[in-house]
Amino acid sequence: SDMCCEMLPKLALRALAAAAPKQGPRLAAGEFGFGTESPPSSSSSARAHTASAASPSAGPPGAPNPQDAAGGGANEWWREAMISAFRDMHGFLCSLTSEIVAPGFAEASGPPPLGGSLDVSAAAALGAKSTLPRLDSRISGTTGTVAFVLPGQRLLMAHVGDSRAIIGTRSRVNSGPWRVSDLTRDHKPDLPDESARIEATGASVVAVGTPPNSTHRVFSSHQTWPSINMSRSLGDLHAHSQGLTCVPEVLLTERLWDPEVEEAVVILGSDGIWDVVTPPVAIQVVAQAAAQGQDPAAALAKEAYGRWGRRFLQGNYSDDITALVKFL
């Protein structure tokens, strides 16, 4: 997770920078907001362990569905760039795993077959530790959510897994109530489009547990690895043979707020946040913490951890709690 947090935004910037000039000056430097400076970005990457089943999240008012956001023709260049970055990250995890399973195989066989082209030297240039960890991604993986804040109060989002990004906006004039919208949907196996891809491989989507604590997992006969409760991820190579994919859903929003009269905050968080804290409450927590001069991300993580504790689960269990907060 830490390595993906470090590398994935840089891979995305590299892919966008390589793709943007091909679209001409208007798209590269004007319409999309890319000039000589790279856009600021935020990212969240957190291992998903367990979660409740979820329905597709609604996008912000006026924003296209992540499935349909690309439009058509040349306007899809930013989508392809983000997909390329996620495939590079996933391919690199494949390469690290192959060094454990079959040492020397990755170097001899070339780039991974799933579209990844990142090798160890390129990873070092992007900030990965020079001594890379021994990593077996066959039954280990991560979610990934990347957000670029663009000129014109627009966001470019790319996302796999069941971490989630939300945005809250409110008036600067009277500090009225926050308006909260999801920017991503949780990639769960029981979503119709996701289950269709999984079942096409011969795997099944099965319900596990008793409501309201039930979830859906991906399962195949004679499976020897733990079943996963997501439909997209980076890593988790065994599950990718069952229809999981590393291809992100990509969303380029329209203008989301007016900085002259509105303030905005974006939260990227793992499912350990959203399993116990609703988006409106999360926005209230970070806004109050910021007003009091506290770290808003730490305040949100503390709130989530306390709520997990009040569930009195065995071993004081809590899911991964990762949060990134950006006031705009």
Image (cartoon, rainbow, N blue to C red):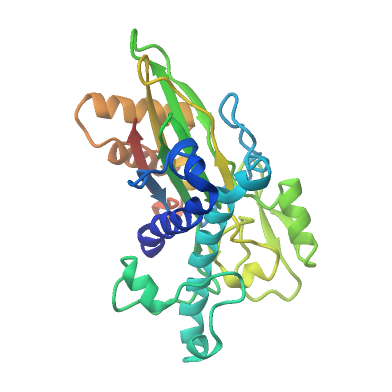
Extreme-front residue of the structure: 25
Report whether residue 162 is seen.
no
Coordinates of residue 189 in the picture (x, y in percent): 68, 53
Query: Would you say 6 lies left or right of 101 here?
Result: left
| Image quadrant where one finds the N terminus | bottom left
| Image quadrant where one finds the C terminus | top left
Residue visible at 57% across and 57% down?
83
Residue visible at 40% across and 28% down?
283
Nearest the eye: 189 or 91: 91
Coordinates of residue 123 in the picture (x, y in percent): 38, 71
Query: Would you say 229 lies left or right of 132 here?
Result: right
Residue visible at 33% across and 72% down?
124
Nearest the eye: 218 or 326: 326
Coordinates of residue 181 in the picture (x, y in percent): 52, 28
Extreme-top residue of the structure: 174
Report whether residue 32 is seen.
yes
